[in-house]
Image (tube, rainbow, N blue to C red):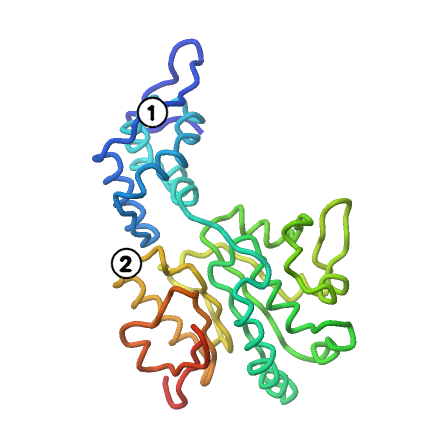
Amino acid sequence: MSPAGGAAAAPAGGTTITNAELTPSDFAAIAAIMQSDARIALSSGKMTLVQSRLAKRLRQHGLAHFRDYVAMVQSDDVERASMVVALTTNHTHFFREVHHFDHFRKVVLPALKQRAAKGHPIRIWSAGCSSGEEVYSITMCLLGPDRASASWLRHADVRLLATDLSPPVVEATRRAVYDAATVRPIPAEYRSTWMRQDGEDYVMVDEARALVTAKVLNLFQPWPLRQLYDVIFCRNVMIYFDEIAKAELEERFVDQLAPTGHLYIGHSERLIGASATRMRSSGQTIYAKIEGQA
């Protein structure tokens, strides 16, 4: 990709750019784009993080100054999207906040099995899925600790959607390949049944991967979702948004939930605004849609 609109050319002799300084005005322009495009609120305390994460982008384009990079992203939609992805945090692990998965297995799963037995489709969404550890933790809960436990799925219409803003982590979810350290939190019976070893890595088996569809999605753009969801996980995502964005997103999640559907959010998050009146607590950062709510 070549520099766009007013960006400086690479320094003579191919000098590597390593010490470009992010000025307050450059940071303000970048923060405005992050707010506009992803509703991510960057405080001034994030200047060092922004400079560190974007230094590689400047080097790739041979730019000596952040002002030139700002000019580029203001005129180059592809690089603008790449910048947003570069500044998006992706951190997760299998069975993170294990109390959520205990609740899902003990409280939600029996009801889902009953609905499936009556012919109802089951839909589950991992919003902000990162590299897939969350959605495959849910998948393994559905499948159970052994293959006999998964028999209920053979004639059931069960689909899991995994979405994220970042194309690289969505692709990682599709691949479903994890190293030994990453799979360590998975209970042994789940790991031995639903993963296969490939050299030093572990891969989710086809039965698990077949249940999951991974797609790139910006949560603040239109959602191409045709059905209501029985369960939505959106955990440790909203901590990056301001209060207005949080309230808007939470209300959209409630709208997207089926009657009595469940929403799981991160340990430091809470429901605010209109969504808080339409949901009841079902556990620590777990909410169920109140019957009769649209």
Residue for point 66% across, 56% down: 184
In which quarter of the view is residue 146 placed?
A: bottom right
Callout 1, which amino acid? Answer: Ala
Q: How many marks?
A: 2
SS state under label 2? loop
Residue most toward the top? 13
Q: Which mark is residue 242?
A: 2
Callout 2, which amino acid? Answer: Asp
The quarter in which the C terminus is drawn is bottom left
Residue for point 78% across, 72% down: 147
Instruction: Please indicate whether residue 244 sits to the left or right of residue 263 in the image.
Output: left
Q: Which residue is mark 1?
A: 20
Instruction: Please indicate whether residue 116 sits to the left or right of residue 49 in the image.
Output: right
State the residue in front, 132 or 190.
Answer: 190
Residue 160 percent across, percent down from the top left: 58, 68
Residue for point 27% across, 47% down: 43
Residue 190 percent across, percent down from the top left: 71, 66
Residue 217 percent across, percent down from the top left: 45, 57
Looking at the image, is 68 positioned above or below residue 41?
Answer: above
Q: CA distance from mark 2 to mark 1?
A: 29 Å
Instruction: Please indicate whether residue 119 sits to the left or right of residue 17 in the image.
Output: right
